[in-house]
Amino acid sequence: MKTIRAKKSSTPWLSSTVLKTIKKRNKLYRKWKRHPSSANWESFKIARNEATTSTRRAKINFFSSKLDTRLPPKQLWKNIRQLSIGNKDENITKFEPDDLNDFFTSVSNSSAVAGLNNFDFSKYSNNHFSFCPVSPNDVVRCINKITSNATGEDGLPLRFIKLALPYILNA
C-alpha cells in the first residue's frame, strides 16, 4: 500500500466557486475541440473570461484580506511570513577588500565613463569646481535615501551595496 502525504495547498485562494468556473471552462474547451463551431467557440470564450475574472477576484480578495493594513501588526507579520514574502536569505559572502576595490576601479573603463573623454569642459571653465570632505555618516545617509532598485553601471543592486557598506567604509 502506498502512503500519500497531504500537503498544504499552494493556492489557498482557490475556492469551490473558482474551481467550478475552471471546470466549466475546461468542459466547454473540450466540447469546442471535439465539435468546432462558432457557437461552441463563443460559449468557451465566455466561460474562459468568467474563469479568469473569478480567479483574479479570488486572488485579490485573498491577498487583500491577508495583507490588510488594518490588521494588528502581529497578525500582519504572521501573514507575511506564511505567504513567504521577503523570506530570502541575505547572506553576504566573504570577500577581500582589494578584490572589491579592483572591481569598482574596473568600472571606470566602461563605455559610459569613457564617453567623458569627449566632453567639452571649456564651456564650464569660468565655474569653480571642487570636492569637499565627506564623512562616512554622510555616505550612509545618502545611500539610505536611495529608493530605486535599479542597478548602476557596475551592475550591482542597491541591496548589495547596502550590505557591503560597513565593510567598504571601514576599508
Image (spheres, grey):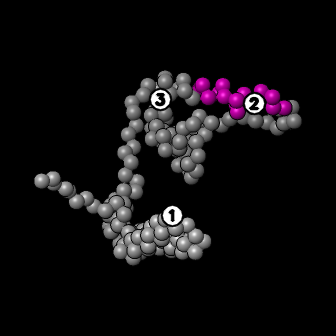
Mark 3 lies on a secondary structure that is loop
Percent from the top left, x then y, of residue 108? 65, 27
Percent from the top left, x then y, of residue 149? 56, 48
The answer to which of 9 and 60 lies nearer the viewer is 9
Q: Residues within 10 Å of mark 1 (few under 14, many from 20)?
A: few
Q: Do the residues labelled 2 and 1 touch (CB within 8 Å)?
A: no
The answer to which of 138 and 47 lies nearer the viewer is 47
Q: Residues within 10 Å of mark 2 (few under 14, many from 20)?
A: few
**Magenta segment main secondary structure:** helix
**Residue that protrudes farthest toward the front in the picture:** 35
Q: Mark 2 points at which residue?
A: 115
Mark 2 lies on a secondary structure that is helix
- Distance Cα–Cα, label 3 vs label 2: 30 Å
Q: Earlier in the sequence, mark 3 or mark 2?
A: 2
Q: What stretch is highlighted in magenta?
A: 105-120
Picture mark count: 3
- Amino acid type indicated by mark 2: Gly
Percent from the top left, x then y, of residue 35? 52, 67
Q: Mark 3 points at which residue?
A: 171
Relative side of 16 to 138, left or right: left
- Distance Cα–Cα, label 3 vs label 1: 67 Å
Identified at 60% across, 71% down, the residue is 38
- Amino acid type indicated by mark 3: Ala
Q: Are marks 3 and 1 in contact (CB under 8 Å)?
A: no
User: Of tags 3 and 1, which is closer to the observer?
Assistant: 1
Whether residue 116 appears in magenta in the rendering, the answer is yes
User: Of tags 2 and 1, which is closer to the observer?
Assistant: 1
Q: Looking at the image, can residue 42 be seen?
A: no
**Location of residue 72 (image quadrant):** bottom left
Q: Earlier in the sequence, mark 3 or mark 1?
A: 1
